[in-house]
């Protein structure tokens, strides 16, 4: 869909939301799609640093700024094309303020815009509990649950949460399994050098095996993201 806002969030810093956002950027960049990127995470701005060449913009999304320029720029951009937003950690309260005070549910309906919240889980109970709260707080928002296998292979508590499973089924929420990046050294270099996935393939320090690991991650992450059926 052209007129969409894709939000990438989760319970706290370190769950992998930036990784999922970067993989989505790579997918759309490879497909030569038209899209705009906003990085609203003031602590790292890693998405911004790695994707300035694609026109990534910074936007404030703190509680104090949530209702003015930062949030407004995101919505305005979505009237023209797809928008990807890397959310800061602990974004639940400012996101809810922006959504409710600006009456975005009705505004999105009026302008033909859909909001997708890609909620990244790392297997923690706190992340799962915040997903419960978020689903309740945003009844009109569409969700995609991202189980990040780069953080854990154990999803027993998620699988055993019958109340969550019921809500996800009622709301037809896709659940995707996001792959691990094989190669911790390469992953650290990509982060330290602020490389996009496509630019990482051209990085001179990477020889045949590291580049193959990047290609594998690009392929597997693209397949996982596309399986949600909303891009």
Image (tube, rainbow, N blue to C red):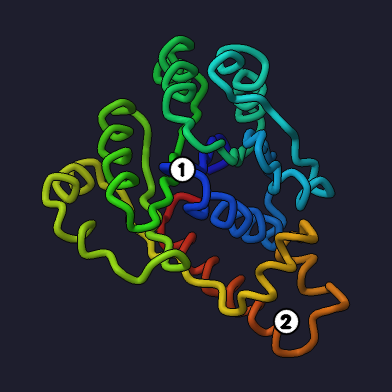
Q: Estimate how packed mark 1 is, as few (under 14), some (14 to 19) or many (20 or more) residues with alpha carbons within 10 Å.
A: some
* Nearer to the camera, 42 or 31: 42
Mark positioned earlier in the residue sequence (1 or 2)? 1
In the rendered view, would you say 138 is above or below 167? above
Q: Estimate how packed mark 2 is, as few (under 14), some (14 to 19) or many (20 or more) residues with alpha carbons within 10 Å.
A: some
Side of 209 where 18 appears, left or right: left
Q: Which residue is mark 2?
A: 211
What SS does tag 2 mark? helix
Q: Which mark is residue 106?
A: none
User: Where's residue 10, x and y in %?
Assistant: 44, 44
In the rendered view, would you say 198 is above or below 108? below
In the rendered view, would you say 128 is above or below 188? above
Side of 26 where 49 appears, left or right: right
Residue at 14% from the left image edge and 46% from the top image edge = 166
| Whether label 1 touches label 2, CB < 8 Å | no
Q: Residue furthest left?
A: 162
Q: Which residue is mark 1?
A: 12
Side of 158 where 141 appears, left or right: right
Residue at 67% from the left image edge and 22% from the top image edge = 73
Residue at 62% from the left image edge and 12% from the top image edge = 68
């Amino acid at each position: 869909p052209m007129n969409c806002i894709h939000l990438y969030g989760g319970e706290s810093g370190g769950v992998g939301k930036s990784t999922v956002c970067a993989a989505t950027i790579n997918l759309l960049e490879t497909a030569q799609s038209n899209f705009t990127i906003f990085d609203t995470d003031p602590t790292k701005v890693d998405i911004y640093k790695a994707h300035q060449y694609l026109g990534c913009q910074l936007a404030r999304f703190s509680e104090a700024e949530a209702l003015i320029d930062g949030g407004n720029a995101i919505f305005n951009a979505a009237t023209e094309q797809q928008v990807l937003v890397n959310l800061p950690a602990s974004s639940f309260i400012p996101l809810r303020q922006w959504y409710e005070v600006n009456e975005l549910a009705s505004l999105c309906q009026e302008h033909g815009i859909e909001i997708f919240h890609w909620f990244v889980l790392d297997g923690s109970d706190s992340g799962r509990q915040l997903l419960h709260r978020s689903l309740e707080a945003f009844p009109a928002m569409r969700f995609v649950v991202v189980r990040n296998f780069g953080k854990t292979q154990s999803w027993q508590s998620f699988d055993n949460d019958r109340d969550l499973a019921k809500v996800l089924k009622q709301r037809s929420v896709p659940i995707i399994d996001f792959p691990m990046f094989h190669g911790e050294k390469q992953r650290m270099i990509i982060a330290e050098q602020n490389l996009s996935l496509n630019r990482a393939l051209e990085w001179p320090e990477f020889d045949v095996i590291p580049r193959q690991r990047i290609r594998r991650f690009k392929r597997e992450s693209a397949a996982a993201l596309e399986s949600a059926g909303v891009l």
